[in-house]
Image (cartoon, coloured by chain):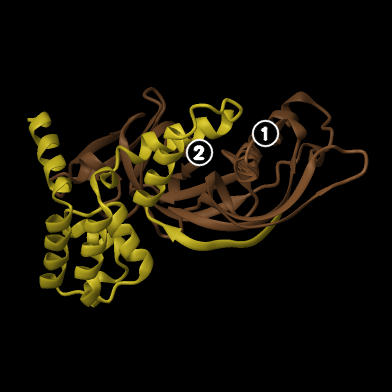
Amino acid sequence: MFILAEMKNVTRITPDLFNLKLNDAIASELNKKLANKVVLNVGLCIALYDITTLQESYVFPGDGSSHTRVSFRYIVFRPFMEEILLGKIRCSSPEGVHVSLGFFDDIIIPPTYLQHPSRFDETEQAWVWEYDTGDGNKHDLFMDAGESIRFKVTAESFHETCPTSTAPSTNVSEKIDSSDSKIPYLITGSINEPGLGLLTWWDN
Amino acid sequence: MEIISSNSAQLSNYEVMKHLQKLKDGRKKDKRQGQLATITYETLRYLENTPCNQQTPESIVACLKALEPFNLNKSEKLMLINSPPTTALEIQLMIEESEERLTEEQVKQVLDIIIEHFPHVQKQDDNEEVEES
């Protein structure tokens, strides 16, 4: 679920931080820059793990800051394909079940990956697994918000969310559409296997 | 910024939790890191509710040693450590083609190893059942 990513950066330390040890100042700059951000095709950055190399620092004409080339390793949230994760249902919509891990919210289980057969209950705003009890009867299993859910990671997608890349759209509704689809890191999960889904389903 | 390797190593939940706890304790004087504080708090809250909260480096190493004879690959072992299974059904989910690779006897052995090294996993289940009844 978590990985280490190796990265390189030229870090600028402004003079007001010169009282700190260089390592500490750089560590805090890197955390300020990356923590809780998604890096394209890497994942959600959590925190600096360690600094592997520090090269010489330079001061450029006209700028009082020091610039240091630094290699470091960062803790990144990036589950591998087929990984089994435990989360909580955030909400449900006709598009599927939205799951949150607390620190990461952009997980969706689309209707085709739910247990079969499932239907969306409009009044309860929840997905329901119509469990076949074997004697011809159906038992409705509701997937309510807040419940713990075990799912398998089946796909991931990264999107560039650079503000300049959005072309000016002609009307307001179009704008909302485009901002909705701009989730930088979206994980798709599935629960259509025995053992997956709400924890309470499989207790016994 | 330059990415040298986007996946140089896998970390277990336990390692991440320990690292973040250390970070949280040592950070009090520094007030300039809004986002870092948010993400460490939220990630810790998630991790501290998982079984890794009660693992120790010794118990993880011992468990991995005990799992060696079963020929599991790295990510399968990582999943077994991160979310220790308590039922054969969970093993089936985590280990690919477990029916062919493991006999029923072996699945039972794996479960016994997990319980032996992480006894708290079992206890949690008992509590839940009590609450329900």
Disc 2 target residue: A95
**In 3D space, how far apart are the residues under numbered discs 2 and 1 (Cα atoms)?**
52 Å
Disc 2: CA contacts within 10 A as few (<14), some (14-19) or many (>=20)? few
Question: Which subunit holds the residue at mark 2?
Answer: A
CA neighbours of label 1 inside 10 A, class few (<14), some (14 to 19), many (20+)? few
From the viewer's perspective, is residue A130 above or below residue A68? above
**Residue at 59% across / 41% down in the picture?**
A24
**Res B17 label:** none
Q: Is residue B67 above or below residue B27?
A: below
Q: Nearer the viewer, residue A115 or B99?
A: B99
Identify the subunit bearing mark 1: A
Q: Nearer the viewer, mark 2 or mark 1?
A: 1
Q: Residue A189: in sight, yes or no?
A: yes
Q: Considering depth in this image, is A192 or A161 the residue closer to the camera?
A: A161
Query: Which residue type does callout 1 highlight?
Result: Asn
Q: Earlier in the sequence, mark 2 or mark 1?
A: 1
Residue B104 falls in image quadrant: bottom left
Chain coloured brown here: A
Disc on res. A19: 1
Residue A182 pos. (x, y %): 66, 39
Q: Circle 2 sits in a helix, a strand or a loop, which is it?
A: loop
In the rendered image of the structure, the colour used to display chain B is: yellow
Q: Residue at x 25, y 51 (%)?
A: B56
Residue A77 left/right relative to B101? right
